[in-house]
Image (cartoon, helix red, strand yellow):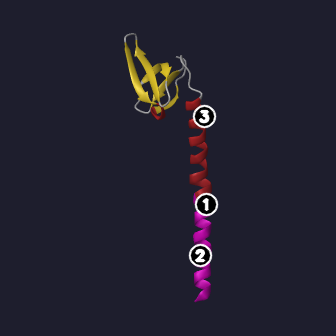
Amino acid sequence: MENNWVAMILYFGVFIGIFYVFIIMPRKKQEKKHGEFLSELKRGAKVVTIGGVRGEVVRVKDDIVVLKVNEDTEMEFIKKAIAYEADNQ
């Protein structure tokens, strides 16, 4: 009976370890990389938001980014809403 508990705890520990290595670690790396991207965001960068809006960065405030989406339209976004840098197309 005692061996069953030890085996169950061992399997559970292995499962937690595998879960951490394949799920949590890559996500933390991705979040760190995205945070660095956002901290280096500068005027003139072409970006895409998480909603799919493409634009050029006009101003960067503390946690706000103003994007120029066409000639006469500027939109404010929370900085975390910027998904990635757009290709220069």
Residue 4 located within the stretch drawn in magenta: yes
The x, y position of residue 10, in whole percent, is: 62, 74
Q: Name the residue rendered at 58%, 65% in the picture.
A: 15
The x, y position of residue 81, in whole percent, is: 45, 33
Question: Disc 2 marks which amino acid?
Answer: Ile
Category of crowding for the residue at label 2, using alpha-carbon neighbours closer than 10 angstroms: few (below 14), some (14–19), many (at least 20): few
Q: Name the residue rendered at 58%, 83% in the picture.
A: 4
Query: What residue does disc 3 label?
Result: 36
Residue range in magenta is 1-19
Q: Which mark is residue 9?
A: 2
Camera-nearest label, 1 or 3: 3
Badges 2 and 1: C-beta atoms under 8 Å apart?
no
In the image, residue 36 above or below residue 69: below
Category of crowding for the residue at label 1, using alpha-carbon neighbours closer than 10 angstroms: few (below 14), some (14–19), many (at least 20): few
In the image, residue 21 above or below residue 6: above
For mark 2, give the secondary structure.
helix
In the image, residue 69 above or below residue 34: above
Q: Name the residue rendered at 59%, 47% in the picture.
A: 28
Question: Disc 1 marks which amino acid?
Answer: Ile
The x, y position of residue 3, in whole percent, is: 62, 85
Label whose residue precedes the other's in the sequence (3 or 2): 2
Query: What residue does disc 1 label?
Result: 18
For mark 1, give the secondary structure.
helix
User: Rounded to the nearest whole Å, what is the CA distance between mark 1 and mark 3?
Assistant: 27 Å
Considering the image in quadrants, where does the N terminus appear?
bottom right
The x, y position of residue 71, in whole percent, is: 40, 10
User: Rounded to the nearest whole Å, what is the CA distance between mark 3 and mark 2?
Assistant: 38 Å
Residue with the most extreme top position: 71
Question: Disc 3 marks which amino acid?
Answer: Glu
